Image (spheres, rainbow, N blue to C red):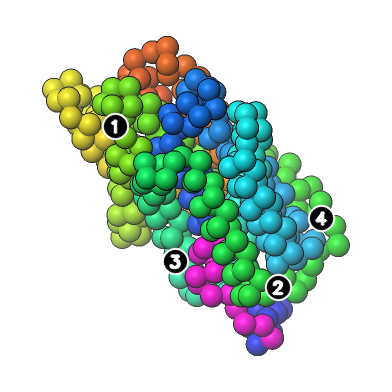
Protein backbone atom coordinates (compact mmCIF):
# COMPACT_ATOMS: atom_id res chain seq x y z
CA UNK A 1 0.00 0.00 0.00
CA UNK A 2 2.83 2.37 0.87
CA UNK A 3 4.64 1.77 -2.45
CA UNK A 4 1.33 2.16 -4.33
CA UNK A 5 0.74 5.52 -2.65
CA UNK A 6 4.23 6.67 -3.67
CA UNK A 7 3.62 5.61 -7.28
CA UNK A 8 0.33 7.51 -7.26
CA UNK A 9 2.10 10.56 -5.83
CA UNK A 10 4.77 10.46 -8.53
CA UNK A 11 2.08 10.20 -11.24
CA UNK A 12 -0.10 12.97 -9.77
CA UNK A 13 2.51 15.56 -8.81
CA UNK A 14 5.90 16.50 -10.14
CA UNK A 15 8.49 15.61 -7.50
CA UNK A 16 10.53 18.52 -6.14
CA UNK A 17 13.87 18.83 -7.88
CA UNK A 18 17.12 17.83 -6.21
CA UNK A 19 18.07 21.50 -6.14
CA UNK A 20 14.97 22.46 -4.16
CA UNK A 21 15.33 19.70 -1.57
CA UNK A 22 19.06 20.28 -1.16
CA UNK A 23 18.61 24.05 -0.90
CA UNK A 24 15.94 23.98 1.81
CA UNK A 25 17.98 21.39 3.75
CA UNK A 26 21.31 23.20 3.41
CA UNK A 27 20.20 26.71 4.40
CA UNK A 28 20.09 25.68 8.08
CA UNK A 29 23.80 24.83 8.30
CA UNK A 30 24.76 27.87 6.24
CA UNK A 31 22.74 30.24 8.43
CA UNK A 32 24.32 28.74 11.54
CA UNK A 33 27.99 29.02 10.57
CA UNK A 34 28.08 32.06 8.28
CA UNK A 35 28.27 34.51 11.21
CA UNK A 36 31.07 32.69 13.04
CA UNK A 37 34.02 34.63 11.50
CA UNK A 38 32.20 37.88 12.29
CA UNK A 39 31.57 37.11 15.99
CA UNK A 40 34.44 39.31 17.28
CA UNK A 41 33.25 42.20 15.09
CA UNK A 42 29.60 41.69 16.08
CA UNK A 43 30.71 41.91 19.72
CA UNK A 44 32.08 45.38 18.98
CA UNK A 45 28.92 46.43 17.11
CA UNK A 46 26.66 45.43 20.01
CA UNK A 47 29.14 46.53 22.70
CA UNK A 48 29.25 42.99 24.09
CA UNK A 49 32.06 40.78 25.31
CA UNK A 50 32.82 37.51 23.55
CA UNK A 51 30.99 35.36 26.09
CA UNK A 52 27.77 37.28 25.34
CA UNK A 53 28.01 37.52 21.56
CA UNK A 54 28.73 33.79 21.20
CA UNK A 55 25.28 33.19 22.70
CA UNK A 56 24.00 33.98 19.21
CA UNK A 57 25.33 30.54 18.22
CA UNK A 58 23.77 28.87 21.25
CA UNK A 59 20.42 30.64 20.74
CA UNK A 60 20.33 29.41 17.15
CA UNK A 61 21.08 25.84 18.30
CA UNK A 62 18.35 25.87 20.95
CA UNK A 63 15.83 27.14 18.41
CA UNK A 64 16.90 24.40 16.01
CA UNK A 65 16.36 21.75 18.70
CA UNK A 66 12.76 22.90 19.15
CA UNK A 67 12.13 23.02 15.40
CA UNK A 68 13.56 19.51 14.96
CA UNK A 69 10.98 18.18 17.40
CA UNK A 70 7.87 19.98 16.11
CA UNK A 71 8.39 20.33 12.34
CA UNK A 72 7.79 16.65 11.56
CA UNK A 73 4.51 16.25 13.50
CA UNK A 74 3.27 19.61 12.18
CA UNK A 75 3.92 18.55 8.58
CA UNK A 76 2.19 15.21 9.24
CA UNK A 77 -0.91 17.10 10.38
CA UNK A 78 -1.01 20.08 8.01
CA UNK A 79 1.15 19.00 5.06
CA UNK A 80 4.76 19.56 3.98
CA UNK A 81 4.19 22.58 1.74
CA UNK A 82 2.32 24.90 4.18
CA UNK A 83 4.77 24.15 7.00
CA UNK A 84 7.72 24.87 4.69
CA UNK A 85 6.11 28.16 3.63
CA UNK A 86 5.40 29.19 7.23
CA UNK A 87 8.85 28.43 8.58
CA UNK A 88 10.64 30.14 5.71
CA UNK A 89 8.53 33.28 6.12
CA UNK A 90 9.68 33.29 9.75
CA UNK A 91 13.30 32.83 8.61
CA UNK A 92 13.06 35.82 6.25
CA UNK A 93 11.51 38.07 8.91
CA UNK A 94 14.02 37.04 11.58
CA UNK A 95 16.93 37.65 9.19
CA UNK A 96 15.62 41.17 8.62
CA UNK A 97 15.15 41.56 12.35
CA UNK A 98 18.77 40.57 12.96
CA UNK A 99 19.95 43.29 10.58
CA UNK A 100 17.81 45.98 12.22
CA UNK A 101 18.54 44.90 15.82
CA UNK A 102 19.55 47.86 17.96
CA UNK A 103 20.71 45.88 21.01
CA UNK A 104 22.14 42.49 21.84
CA UNK A 105 18.91 41.11 23.33
CA UNK A 106 16.85 41.74 20.21
CA UNK A 107 19.67 40.28 18.14
CA UNK A 108 19.81 37.08 20.21
CA UNK A 109 16.02 36.68 19.95
CA UNK A 110 16.15 37.08 16.17
CA UNK A 111 18.94 34.49 15.96
CA UNK A 112 16.74 32.12 17.97
CA UNK A 113 13.95 32.63 15.41
CA UNK A 114 16.36 32.21 12.50
CA UNK A 115 16.64 28.56 13.53
CA UNK A 116 13.27 28.13 11.79
CA UNK A 117 15.48 27.27 8.81
CA UNK A 118 16.09 23.89 10.52
CA UNK A 119 12.60 22.92 9.32
CA UNK A 120 14.04 22.66 5.82
CA UNK A 121 16.39 19.88 6.92
CA UNK A 122 13.54 17.96 8.61
CA UNK A 123 11.10 18.43 5.72
CA UNK A 124 13.64 17.43 3.07
CA UNK A 125 14.06 14.06 4.80
CA UNK A 126 10.35 13.35 5.13
CA UNK A 127 9.61 14.52 1.57
CA UNK A 128 12.18 12.07 0.22
CA UNK A 129 10.47 9.39 2.29
CA UNK A 130 7.08 10.43 0.86
CA UNK A 131 8.16 10.09 -2.75
CA UNK A 132 11.01 7.60 -3.01
CA UNK A 133 11.88 4.17 -1.67
CA UNK A 134 14.73 1.69 -1.95
CA UNK A 135 17.89 2.69 -3.82
CA UNK A 136 16.36 5.89 -5.17
CA UNK A 137 15.72 7.15 -1.63
CA UNK A 138 19.30 6.26 -0.65
CA UNK A 139 20.67 8.21 -3.62
CA UNK A 140 18.56 11.24 -2.72
CA UNK A 141 19.63 11.16 0.94
CA UNK A 142 23.27 10.97 -0.17
CA UNK A 143 22.82 13.93 -2.51
CA UNK A 144 21.22 16.05 0.21
CA UNK A 145 23.89 15.09 2.78
CA UNK A 146 26.66 16.10 0.39
CA UNK A 147 25.12 19.53 -0.15
CA UNK A 148 24.68 19.98 3.60
CA UNK A 149 28.36 19.15 4.14
CA UNK A 150 29.32 21.96 1.76
CA UNK A 151 27.58 24.53 4.01
CA UNK A 152 30.19 24.46 6.80
CA UNK A 153 32.91 24.55 4.13
CA UNK A 154 31.82 27.71 2.30
CA UNK A 155 29.71 29.38 5.02
CA UNK A 156 32.55 30.71 7.21
CA UNK A 157 34.57 31.85 4.19
CA UNK A 158 31.53 33.60 2.71
CA UNK A 159 30.70 35.24 6.04
CA UNK A 160 34.29 36.41 6.46
CA UNK A 161 34.39 37.97 2.98
CA UNK A 162 31.06 39.76 3.50
CA UNK A 163 32.26 41.05 6.87
CA UNK A 164 35.59 42.30 5.50
CA UNK A 165 34.26 44.02 2.38
CA UNK A 166 30.70 45.08 3.27
CA UNK A 167 30.40 44.95 7.06
CA UNK A 168 29.31 42.17 9.39
CA UNK A 169 25.66 43.21 9.56
CA UNK A 170 25.34 42.75 5.81
CA UNK A 171 25.50 39.00 6.44
CA UNK A 172 21.86 39.20 7.54
CA UNK A 173 20.82 41.08 4.42
CA UNK A 174 22.46 38.29 2.45
CA UNK A 175 20.48 35.68 4.41
CA UNK A 176 17.28 37.67 3.83
CA UNK A 177 17.85 37.68 0.07
CA UNK A 178 18.73 33.98 0.13
CA UNK A 179 15.57 33.26 2.13
CA UNK A 180 13.45 35.13 -0.43
CA UNK A 181 14.98 33.11 -3.27
CA UNK A 182 14.30 29.85 -1.46
CA UNK A 183 10.75 30.98 -0.66
CA UNK A 184 10.17 31.52 -4.38
CA UNK A 185 11.64 28.08 -5.08
CA UNK A 186 9.24 26.51 -2.55
CA UNK A 187 6.22 28.25 -4.08
CA UNK A 188 7.25 27.23 -7.59
CA UNK A 189 8.59 23.71 -7.12
CA UNK A 190 7.48 22.21 -3.80
CA UNK A 191 4.16 20.44 -4.32
CA UNK A 192 2.38 18.78 -1.43
CA UNK A 193 3.72 15.24 -0.95
CA UNK A 194 1.83 14.16 2.16
CA UNK A 195 -1.26 12.38 0.82
CA UNK A 196 -2.14 10.79 4.16
CA UNK A 197 -2.28 13.65 6.67
CA UNK A 198 -2.57 12.65 10.31
CA UNK A 199 -5.65 13.76 12.23
CA UNK A 200 -3.71 13.69 15.50
CA UNK A 201 -0.63 15.90 15.55
CA UNK A 202 0.47 14.42 18.88
CA UNK A 203 0.45 10.79 17.74
CA UNK A 204 4.14 10.81 16.91
CA UNK A 205 5.12 12.67 20.09
CA UNK A 206 3.15 10.17 22.22
CA UNK A 207 5.46 7.41 20.98
CA UNK A 208 8.55 9.15 22.37
CA UNK A 209 8.57 7.36 25.80
CA UNK A 210 8.83 3.94 24.12
CA UNK A 211 11.80 5.16 22.14
CA UNK A 212 13.47 6.79 25.12
CA UNK A 213 13.32 3.51 27.04
CA UNK A 214 15.15 1.61 24.29
CA UNK A 215 18.75 0.79 25.18
CA UNK A 216 19.50 0.49 21.47
CA UNK A 217 18.65 4.16 20.97
CA UNK A 218 20.85 5.94 23.50
CA UNK A 219 24.42 4.82 22.66
CA UNK A 220 24.35 5.84 18.96
CA UNK A 221 22.43 9.01 19.85
CA UNK A 222 25.10 10.05 22.36
CA UNK A 223 27.85 9.14 19.87
CA UNK A 224 26.19 11.36 17.28
CA UNK A 225 25.58 14.17 19.78
CA UNK A 226 29.08 14.28 21.28
CA UNK A 227 30.75 14.08 17.86
CA UNK A 228 28.43 16.81 16.54
CA UNK A 229 29.37 19.04 19.47
CA UNK A 230 32.90 19.44 18.10
CA UNK A 231 31.48 21.66 15.36
CA UNK A 232 29.84 23.95 17.90
CA UNK A 233 32.95 24.00 20.06
CA UNK A 234 35.26 24.69 17.13
CA UNK A 235 33.09 27.36 15.54
CA UNK A 236 32.76 29.18 18.89
CA UNK A 237 36.33 28.79 20.16
CA UNK A 238 38.38 28.98 16.94
CA UNK A 239 37.47 32.60 16.02
CA UNK A 240 38.60 33.73 19.49
CA UNK A 241 41.88 31.83 19.05
CA UNK A 242 42.31 33.29 15.56
CA UNK A 243 41.84 36.88 16.75
CA UNK A 244 43.51 36.85 20.16
CA UNK A 245 46.42 34.51 19.38
CA UNK A 246 47.05 35.09 15.66
CA UNK A 247 45.41 38.49 14.95
CA UNK A 248 43.53 37.29 11.84
CA UNK A 249 40.81 39.10 9.86
CA UNK A 250 37.25 37.72 9.40
CA UNK A 251 37.98 36.48 5.86
CA UNK A 252 41.13 34.70 7.06
CA UNK A 253 39.16 33.14 9.92
CA UNK A 254 36.49 31.97 7.49
CA UNK A 255 39.11 30.27 5.33
CA UNK A 256 40.71 28.43 8.24
CA UNK A 257 37.37 27.30 9.68
CA UNK A 258 36.89 25.21 6.54
CA UNK A 259 39.41 22.58 7.63
CA UNK A 260 36.92 20.49 9.64
CA UNK A 261 34.28 20.20 6.88
CA UNK A 262 37.08 19.69 4.35
CA UNK A 263 38.06 16.55 6.23
CA UNK A 264 34.44 15.54 6.84
CA UNK A 265 33.58 14.90 3.16
CA UNK A 266 36.28 12.26 2.42
CA UNK A 267 35.47 10.60 5.77
CA UNK A 268 31.88 10.24 4.58
CA UNK A 269 33.07 8.68 1.32
CA UNK A 270 35.55 6.24 2.84
CA UNK A 271 33.19 4.88 5.49
CA UNK A 272 30.96 3.55 2.69
CA UNK A 273 33.81 1.24 1.68
CA UNK A 274 34.50 0.13 5.26
CA UNK A 275 31.02 -0.47 6.64
CA UNK A 276 30.68 -3.95 5.07
CA UNK A 277 34.07 -5.10 6.38
CA UNK A 278 34.11 -3.81 9.96
CA UNK A 279 31.60 -3.62 12.80
CA UNK A 280 29.83 -0.39 13.66
CA UNK A 281 31.48 -0.34 17.09
CA UNK A 282 34.99 -0.65 15.61
CA UNK A 283 34.34 2.09 13.05
CA UNK A 284 32.98 4.42 15.72
CA UNK A 285 35.98 3.83 17.99
CA UNK A 286 38.36 4.40 15.07
CA UNK A 287 36.58 7.62 14.13
CA UNK A 288 36.63 8.78 17.76
CA UNK A 289 40.40 8.20 18.00
CA UNK A 290 40.85 10.40 14.92
CA UNK A 291 38.53 12.96 16.50
CA UNK A 292 40.81 13.16 19.54
CA UNK A 293 44.03 13.04 17.50
CA UNK A 294 43.25 16.23 15.58
CA UNK A 295 43.15 18.70 18.50
CA UNK A 296 45.95 16.84 20.32
CA UNK A 297 48.28 17.19 17.31
CA UNK A 298 47.19 20.81 16.93
CA UNK A 299 48.19 21.53 20.53
CA UNK A 300 51.59 19.88 20.11
CA UNK A 301 52.39 21.68 16.83
CA UNK A 302 51.54 25.08 18.32
CA UNK A 303 54.34 24.49 20.82
CA UNK A 304 56.83 24.16 17.95
CA UNK A 305 55.40 26.63 15.41
CA UNK A 306 53.63 29.99 15.70
CA UNK A 307 51.93 29.96 12.27
CA UNK A 308 48.10 29.70 12.38
CA UNK A 309 48.21 26.60 10.15
CA UNK A 310 50.04 24.78 12.95
CA UNK A 311 46.79 24.94 14.91
CA UNK A 312 44.13 24.76 12.18
CA UNK A 313 45.56 22.24 9.68
CA UNK A 314 45.48 19.22 12.07
CA UNK A 315 41.74 19.83 12.45
CA UNK A 316 41.40 18.05 9.09
CA UNK A 317 41.98 14.82 11.02
CA UNK A 318 39.18 15.66 13.44
CA UNK A 319 36.81 16.38 10.55
CA UNK A 320 37.80 13.12 8.87
CA UNK A 321 37.00 11.17 12.04
CA UNK A 322 33.60 12.85 12.34
CA UNK A 323 32.88 11.99 8.72
CA UNK A 324 33.36 8.32 9.61
CA UNK A 325 31.28 8.51 12.79
CA UNK A 326 28.10 10.22 11.58
CA UNK A 327 26.85 7.81 8.88
CA UNK A 328 27.42 4.79 11.15
CA UNK A 329 25.82 6.40 14.21
CA UNK A 330 22.84 7.78 12.28
CA UNK A 331 22.15 4.38 10.72
CA UNK A 332 22.15 2.80 14.19
CA UNK A 333 19.76 5.50 15.44
CA UNK A 334 17.23 4.86 12.68
CA UNK A 335 17.45 1.08 13.18
CA UNK A 336 17.17 1.24 16.99
CA UNK A 337 13.37 0.98 16.90
CA UNK A 338 12.39 0.58 13.24
CA UNK A 339 8.72 1.40 13.78
CA UNK A 340 9.71 4.76 15.31
CA UNK A 341 12.45 5.77 12.86
CA UNK A 342 10.94 9.23 12.30
CA UNK A 343 10.69 9.95 16.01
CA UNK A 344 14.24 8.67 16.52
CA UNK A 345 15.53 11.07 13.88
CA UNK A 346 13.75 14.04 15.45
CA UNK A 347 14.76 13.33 19.04
CA UNK A 348 18.38 12.54 18.20
CA UNK A 349 18.68 15.71 16.10
CA UNK A 350 17.26 17.77 18.96
CA UNK A 351 19.68 16.21 21.47
CA UNK A 352 22.57 16.85 19.10
CA UNK A 353 21.98 20.58 18.94
CA UNK A 354 21.17 20.83 22.67
CA UNK A 355 24.46 19.18 23.71
CA UNK A 356 26.30 21.26 21.13
CA UNK A 357 24.68 24.45 22.41
CA UNK A 358 25.46 23.67 26.06
CA UNK A 359 29.09 22.68 25.45
CA UNK A 360 29.86 25.56 23.08
CA UNK A 361 28.04 27.98 25.38
CA UNK A 362 30.16 26.82 28.32
CA UNK A 363 33.35 27.27 26.30
CA UNK A 364 32.33 30.68 24.99
CA UNK A 365 31.39 31.87 28.47
CA UNK A 366 34.79 30.95 29.93
CA UNK A 367 37.27 31.25 27.05
CA UNK A 368 38.19 34.86 27.88
CA UNK A 369 39.36 33.77 31.32
CA UNK A 370 41.60 30.86 30.25
CA UNK A 371 44.29 30.13 27.68
CA UNK A 372 42.15 29.97 24.49
CA UNK A 373 44.12 27.18 22.79
CA UNK A 374 44.21 25.05 25.96
CA UNK A 375 40.51 25.63 26.58
CA UNK A 376 39.39 24.75 23.05
CA UNK A 377 41.68 21.72 22.73
CA UNK A 378 40.63 20.44 26.15
CA UNK A 379 36.90 20.65 25.32
CA UNK A 380 37.42 18.96 21.94
CA UNK A 381 39.33 16.08 23.55
CA UNK A 382 36.61 15.69 26.19
CA UNK A 383 34.00 15.43 23.42
CA UNK A 384 36.13 12.76 21.74
CA UNK A 385 36.51 10.76 24.94
CA UNK A 386 32.74 10.91 25.53
CA UNK A 387 32.24 9.68 21.95
CA UNK A 388 34.55 6.68 22.51
CA UNK A 389 32.84 5.75 25.79
CA UNK A 390 29.39 5.92 24.15
CA UNK A 391 30.67 3.78 21.25
CA UNK A 392 31.56 0.96 23.63
CA UNK A 393 27.86 0.52 24.47
CA UNK A 394 26.73 0.05 20.86
CA UNK A 395 24.93 -3.30 20.71
CA UNK A 396 25.23 -5.79 17.88
CA UNK A 397 21.96 -7.62 18.58
CA UNK A 398 18.64 -7.17 16.80
CA UNK A 399 16.75 -3.84 17.07
CA UNK A 400 13.71 -3.52 19.31
CA UNK A 401 10.32 -4.38 17.81
Residue 331, placed above or below residue 240 = below
**Distance from the alpha carbon under mark 1 to that under mark 3:** 34 Å
**Distance from the alpha carbon under mark 4 to that under mark 2:** 17 Å
| Residue where numbered disc 3 is placed | 143
Residue 37: say if magenta. Answer: no
The quadrant where residue 80 appears: bottom right
**Distance from the alpha carbon under mark 1 to that under mark 4:** 49 Å
Q: Position of residue 348 (x, y in %)?
A: 59, 44
The earlier-in-sequence mark between 4 and 3 is 3
Viewer can see residue 260? no
Residue at 51% over, 41% down: 169
Residue range (magenta): 12-24
| Residue where numbered disc 4 is placed | 201
| Residue where numbered disc 1 is placed | 248
| Residue where numbered disc 2 is placed | 192
The earlier-in-sequence mark between 1 and 3 is 3
Q: Position of residue 28 (x, y in %)?
A: 54, 51
Amino acid sequence: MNSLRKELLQMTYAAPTNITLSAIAGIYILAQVIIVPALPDLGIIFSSDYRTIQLSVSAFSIGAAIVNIIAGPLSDRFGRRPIAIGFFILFILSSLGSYFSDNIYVFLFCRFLQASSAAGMVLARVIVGDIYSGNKATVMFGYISTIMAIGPLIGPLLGGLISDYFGSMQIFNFLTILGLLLFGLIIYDLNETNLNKSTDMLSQIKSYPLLLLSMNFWPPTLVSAFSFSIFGLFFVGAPFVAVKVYGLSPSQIGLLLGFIPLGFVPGNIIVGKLVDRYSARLLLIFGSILLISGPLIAFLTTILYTHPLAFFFPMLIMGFGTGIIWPVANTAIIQAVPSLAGSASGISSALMVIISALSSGFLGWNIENIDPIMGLVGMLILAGVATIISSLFIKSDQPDN
